Structures are given as C-alpha cells and as structure tokens.
Image: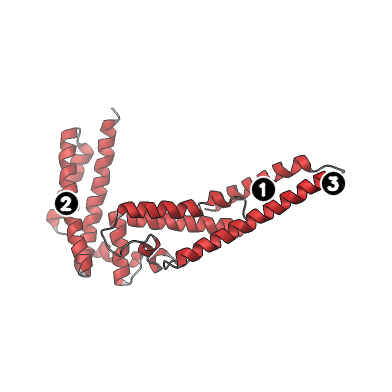
Amino acid sequence: MYLTRYLIRAAARSASLCQYQPIITAHPSNSHRSVVSKHLATSSSTVQGGRKFLTSFVEELEKRGFKEGLDIDKQNVFDLFKLDHTFTINESKLRREYTNIQRSIHPDKFVNSDPVTQDRATNLAMFVNYAYETLKHPYKRARYLLSVKLNESQDELDKKLDAIKLDDEFLSRMMEMREEVELGSDEILLARIAGEVEDDLIALMIAMNKNFKNNETDALIEQLARLKFLGNLHVKLAERQESFSQF
C-alpha cells in the first residue's frame, strides 16, 4: 500500500516538474507569468475539486451505513452494495454496485489531488475491494455473515471452526477425492469428480441458506467447516482441469 502511495505521489511530482520547467525562464515575460498563474490556479482547483468530490461520495456511502476507517467486522457490507442481508445474493447487482463505486473512487482519479486525498482514496478502494471479495465467494460470504450473526470477529469464528470435528466419513471422502484429483490424468474422471463436488456444494449451500434464515448458528458452524473443504477441493479441480486444457 505504501509503495502504491509513493509511486502515485512521485508520478504527480514528476508530472508537475515537466509542466513547469518549459515556462520558467531567468527573466519571465508578462505572458509567461500569466501562463504560470493560470496553471497554478488550475492545479489548485483540481486538488480542491478532487478532495470535495471524494468527501461528497463518502458521505453518500455513509447514508448506506458505511463508516470510514472501521474494520470490515464492524460494518455491514451488504448495505454498501445495496444487497439484502442474506446468504444467497444477487451476484449481478453486487458486480454492478462494485463497478459503480470503484469507478468513482479509483486512485487514478486523484493522481493530481493532495496526498491526504490520495491516501483516503487508496484506503477506500482497498476496503471496497476487500468487501467485494468477501461477498463474492460463498465461503467468505458465509463466514462474514455468520460472524455478524454471532456478533464475533471473523478471527474468533475461525477458532470455533478449528475446534469442529467433522465426521470421519466426510473427511475420508474428501481425502480420497483430493488424491484422485492430484494424481488423476483422465479428464473424464476429473469431470465426474467435479460434478459430484458441485452437487455437494449446491446441496450444502441450500441447507445453509435455510439455516441462516432460521438463525441455526450451531449447524452453520459445522456446515461452514464442510464448505471450506468442498470449496478448496473445487478450486483444486479447476486448476487440474485448466492444466489439461493447455495441451
């Protein structure tokens, strides 16, 4: 993050030098002085405009419940993207709202602003990215939503997940399928396993959605642990299938 801020500021300083050097002479004429004055006035206006725009935009986000500077555990990011507080979400709306927000706060828009505004835009963009990734992925979304329901941090929830002992049948099946994926050289075999994993994921998420609606938090903790195993296996499968497509 600090490297990004340094590069943005360095680029801004370099751009300013390149713009000023050609018009500064040992004995500037009145016309040259006029050009410099207009340039300084424009630069000042750009800085103030960027700061004002970002402040105004943050105020709009605050109307959705966003609180600048607070960790994600202490905010409801569903409101940030105008989504219902549910496990099943409108993914198209999430992408649309995310794109709209990022288009307004992207750090590149504030390259000519003052350092404070640049830092603010960078931090805000990073938070929005993190919030989007949290809601985009089922496991991260379930983990976040459950931590909200339990009024706990996600780190505290992770400790509960680590203490969960899943049944031996499920764990053995996960190990066998993972070995088949890692050692398998048959695309048909991988496709069959992928189908089984996707069926398991769909069934599990349907059950989790029901339990979220009914606030069955104990059941959700165990289901979240299962979702983590299945999600990791699904990612591994996608990687192996991608490796076949490259040949």
- Residue 176 spot, x, y in % from top left: 16, 45
At a point 30% along the width and 30% down the height, the residue shown is: 246
Q: Nearer the viewer, residue 128 or 166?
A: 128
Q: Which residue is mark 3?
A: 30
Q: Which residue is mark 1?
A: 13
Q: Residue at x 35, y 55 (%)?
A: 94
Image quadrant containing the C terminus: top left
Mark 2 to mark 1: distance in Å?
Answer: 55 Å
- Please identify the quarter of the rendering in which residue 159 is found: bottom left
- Of labels 3 and 1, the one closer to you: 3
Q: Label 2: which residue?
A: 200
Badge 3 amino acid: Asn
Tag 3's secondary structure? helix
Question: Visible in this render: residue 7?
Answer: yes
How many residues crowd mark 3 within 10 Å: few (<14), some (14–19), many (20+)?
A: few
With 39 as the anchor, is 237 left or right in this view? left
- Vertical order, 197 against 242 (above or below): below
Amino acid type at image mark 1:
Arg
Task: Judge from the rendering whether residue 69 lies leftward or rightward of residue 9; answer left or right.
Answer: left
Q: Are the residues tagged 3 and 1 within 8 Å (C-beta)?
A: no
Q: Position of residue 114 (x, y in %)?
A: 63, 56
Left or right position of 148 against 43: left
Q: Residue at x 64, y 48 (%)?
A: 12
Say what secondary structure mark 1 lies in: helix
Mark 2 or mark 3, which is nearer to you?
Answer: 3
Q: How far apart, in angstroms, are the residues tagged by discs 3 and 1?
A: 26 Å
Disc with the residue nearer the chain's start (2 vs 3) = 3
- Identify which residue is drawn at 26% across, 38% down: 240
Residue found at the very far bottom of the displayed protein: 151
**Of the residues under marks 3 and 1, which one precedes in the sequence?**
1
